[in-house]
Image (tube, grey):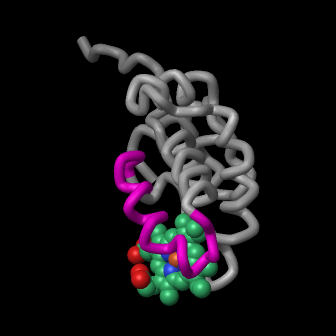
């Protein structure tokens, strides 16, 4: 888990960032940064991707934490696992988009400047 996510947990903010569980859904802020990073992202594909992720990516090992990798690392990771999980190309894209969404950094609290 990133330091920022840990800080967000410590501050009691962004509870979603604390959960490594499979129910994680992207926040509005994460959707905004996803749109910036992936301009042609079809956000309607995120929820089907989440469902495929929970059902197909936890068969051989525990579902990996979406926060275990930066967003840009997920497409190749999912490509590597797609045939193992019996995902077709469009399903792999959905899972990849879901993971890219929920691994976007959350804006944390503004750090206090120390006097
Ligand atoms: C048929 C079994 C199987 C399925 C289904 C499967 N995996 Fe894997 N996965 C493995 C095996 C075996 C490894 C370890 C070897 C490797 O890294 O290639 C692994 C490793 C990984 C790793 C690397 C773990 C690490 O920290 O080094 C990630 C990430 C991963 N899988 C993600 C996924 C995702 C995402 C899906 C769903 C699309 C998925 N896996 C579905 C078998 C599977």
Image x and y of residue 113, in percent: 29, 14
Choose between 75 and 102: the one closer to the eye. Answer: 75
Residue at the farthest bottom position: 60
Looking at the image, can residue 12 be seen?
no
The reply to whether the magenta stretch includes residue 80 is yes
Choose between 10 and 48: the one closer to the eye. Answer: 48
The quadrant in which residue 51 appears is bottom right
Quarter of the figure with the C terminus = top left
Magenta stretch secondary structure, dominant = helix
Looking at the image, can residue 22 be seen?
yes
Q: How many marks?
A: 0
Query: Measured along the vertical axis of the image, is residue 84 above or below residue 25?
Result: below
Residue at the farthest front position: 89
Classify residue 6 as left or right of residue 76: right
Image x and y of residue 33, in percent: 46, 26
Q: Residue at x 43, y 72 (%)?
A: 80
Residue at the farthest left position: 115
The quadrant in which residue 4 appears is top left
Choose between 108 and 94: the one closer to the eye. Answer: 94
Classify residue 102 as left or right of residue 50: left
Query: Measured along the vertical axis of the image, is residue 40 above or below residue 2?
Result: above
Q: Residue at x 38, y 49 (%)?
A: 70
What residue span does the magenta drawing correspond to?
A: 70-88
Q: Residue at x 72, y 63 (%)?
A: 54
The reply to whether the magenta stretch includes residue 8 is no
Image x and y of residue 18, in percent: 61, 47
Query: Measured along the vertical axis of the image, is residue 114 above or below residue 38?
Result: above
Image x and y of residue 59, in percent: 69, 80
Q: Residue at x 45, y 59 (%)?
A: 68
Query: Measured along the vertical axis of the image, is residue 45 above or below residue 93?
Result: above
The quadrant in which residue 39 appears is top left
């Amino acid at each position: 888990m990133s330091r920022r996510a840990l800080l967000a947990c410590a501050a009691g903010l962004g509870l979603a960032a604390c959960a490594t569980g499979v129910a994680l859904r992207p926040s509005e802020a994460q959707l905004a940064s996803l749109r910036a990073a992936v301009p042609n992202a079809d956000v309607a594909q995120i929820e089907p991707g989440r469902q495929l992720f929970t059902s197909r990516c936890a068969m051989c090992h525990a579902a990996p934490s979406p926060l275990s990798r930066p967003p840009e690392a997920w497409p190749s990771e999912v490509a590597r696992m797609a045939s193992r999980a019996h995902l077709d190309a469009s399903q792999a894209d959905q899972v990849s988009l879901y993971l890219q969404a929920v691994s976007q950094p959350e804006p944390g609290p503004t750090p206090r400047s120390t006097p």
